[in-house]
Amino acid sequence: MALVPRSFSRLARLMAIALCGLFLQAGVAFAHAALNSSEPADGTVADTAPSVYVLTFSEPVSPLHLKLIRPDGTVLPLERFELKDRTVAIAAPTDLGRGTHVLSWRVTSADGHPIGGSVVFSLGATSAAPPAMGDRIDWAVRAGILLSKLALYVGLFIGVGGVFSLCWLPCSTRPGRNIVAVALGTGFLGALAAVGFQGLDALGVPLTHFVEPAVWSTAMATSFGRTGMAALVAFGVAAMALSGKGRFARVSSLAALIVSSAALSLSGHASTAEPQWLMRPAVFLHVAAIGLWVGALAPLGMALRRGDPMALRALRRFSTFIPYVLVGLVGAGVVLTIVQVEKPQALLETAYGQVFMVKMALLVGLFLLAIANRWRLTEPVVAGGRTSAKHLVRSIAAETLVVFLIFGAVSCWRFTPPPRALPALAAQAASLHIHTDKAMVLIEVLPGRMGEVDVSINVLTGESEPLAAKEVTLILSKLDSGIEPFKRIAVRRGEADWGVDRMAIPLPGLWQLRVDILINDFEKVTLSDEISIGP
Amino acid sequence: MLSKLIITAAFLGISATTAFAHSTLEVTEAHVGASYKAVIRVPHGCEGKPTLALRVQIPEGMIAAKPMPKPGWTLEKIKGAYAKSYDYFGTPMKEGVKEIVWKGGSLADDEYEEFVFRAFLTESLPVGKTLYVPLVQECPDGATERWIEVPAEGKSSDDLESPAPGIRLLEKKSGH
């Protein structure tokens, strides 16, 4: 023994003890602690924020990390806690707002094996999904969409509609040609820009990506791509009509008007609404009528201003046909409104309805002007009054201005889903299908957004036969946001249908989802995958 | 420094053997073609509630199961047909106890108890593999603690929340 240093023999003894420990350990199954209960309980909705959180485990534990995930997704580490036997009492932060919070814990017990879980609780109410598009509006892109749409409308109505009026109203010098030509050019550029902005919006990328081919190909793949193409064709044909003469000009201006009206019925939420056989023709009629009316304003106004000898004939013809156009315009508009708005109160309660009310107010102004033109000014002008003609020109200019404002209001509809579509938007479910040899589940989260949801779980065997399960448990976690798994026991709704009602999903994003199916007392199947939850 | 580390490691190892948070079997290795005495160790109830019944499923290949009566508990032996006929010391066995239930007792969450049965591990069982013996603890108000999870091929029971206790199957002992 004297040859061996003391420290070495001590080391050897220690090694032996350690090895014994390891061998003993190998002989048993690892034992993990389990959460017995929590305060607040998982899934509760409380009016006031608790001052302390208490987690009670099946055995003493030591926390590895404790954190609170707030409704906005920010993570608050909880560092003040007290251990007492099998409970962990955590000092709760005092400045919590309303909404769904997640107390996410990860602890280790005597076996050294870490386990984690989450307690989901709401203060006041379950977090509601933020209003659609929330804080992520790219204002530059939005302004671009708005302005390019406005330019497109100018081109379609003042431009193409103007060309039609120029060709069909009897004016010797085709007055207002310049205005109409500029409108056509504006529309051409607007249509191109609108397609680009549509692509930016569809991809959700900022203005700097405007020239990227992916943006344009994406836009062309949307229904608006067809609208853009048709509009460009309409502008081209209208330009030909503008430079042509006689019969050719008349026919091509009519073709341009038809194509331009078709352009707007190829996309947009009015055209895509059901019933299609009614909605698409209604949009076409509405748009064609606007083209006829608005398009005539500039040529008429300019003709009157210049004292064109044919102006009076033109004005008379306009006055004759415009009532029919208006009947078509209003009739189609009423149909579109009824389908889109559904309930009168939606006019006040939804953004779409509010835009509609603004448009209506502007329209009333426009109609008053038009009526004033017709009853007070047109007759005297036709009778030959010079002052009245001046007034009429001014009135027509004012009408055009109001028309611009209406175009602006209508462009805003691009961002407001119609009331008809709102329930459908809210009711869009997130779904997931997991298939294994032993079992298969179809999961539907409704709505597929954060906040309070109903989850339905259809349980089938690997051969797609209904599976009579004894118990179904849903487990969700979101590790990238620090949310450890939390469980909900599903309620049986039918032979193979199970559900979890009014479950709170605290954050949007990709969640890890697991379904435990208890087939009988002794057999359990576990399926897992990821599901995307919308904001 | 090194010695401190070793002592810590040793303590960790020992403490792991003492904390039985799962319901487990005392003996985790056994020879096929021999009797096996199963001692089920129940360390706690269901989320704090007392255990009112313990149910054990006798896995296929484990035959002639005989539970040990326990004072204060009623025994129930649920019999049924085996998947095939097994040779039990020359006697073909086609049916027997498939599930054992101890019930009528009450084991508080902060108490420890052991439940015993004996069975024969037939030679048809795969040597080198693990035979899982699923257990269910039943508590008041429908609460249960199910030790029934079986690891997927190549995975370990350590990763499971409620693993079924297992017996590693050893080769049959030769001679007598």
Image: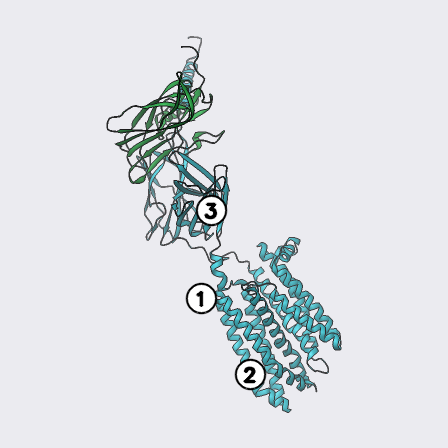
Q: Earlier in the sequence, mark 1 or mark 3?
A: 1
What's the distance in space between the residues labelled 1 and 3, CA to CA?
Answer: 33 Å
- What amino acid is at disc 1? Glu
Coordinates of residue A109 in the picture (x, y in percent): 37, 32
**Which residue is label 1 attached to?**
A349
Q: Residue at x 52, y 63 (%)?
A: A416
Q: Tell me the number on the disc at residue A429.
A: none
**Which residue is label 2 attached to?**
A371
- Classify mark 2: residues with Cα within 10 Å, few (<14), some (14-19) or many (20+): few
Front-lying residue, A402 or A378? A378
What's the distance in space between the residues labelled 2 and 1, CA to CA?
Answer: 31 Å
Disc 1 secondary structure class: helix
Front-lying residue, A356 or A276? A276
- What amino acid is at disc 2? Ile
| Chain coloured green in this rendering | B
Disc 3 secondary structure class: strand
Q: Are marks 2 and 1 on the same chain?
A: yes
* Relative height, residue A396 to residue B173 (above, below): below
Residue A385 visible in this rendered orientation of the protein: no
On the rendered image, what quadrant is the N terminus of chain A found in? top left
What's the distance in space between the residues labelled 2 and 3, CA to CA?
Answer: 59 Å
Coordinates of residue A138 in the picture (x, y in percent): 55, 58
Q: Residue furthest left?
A: B72
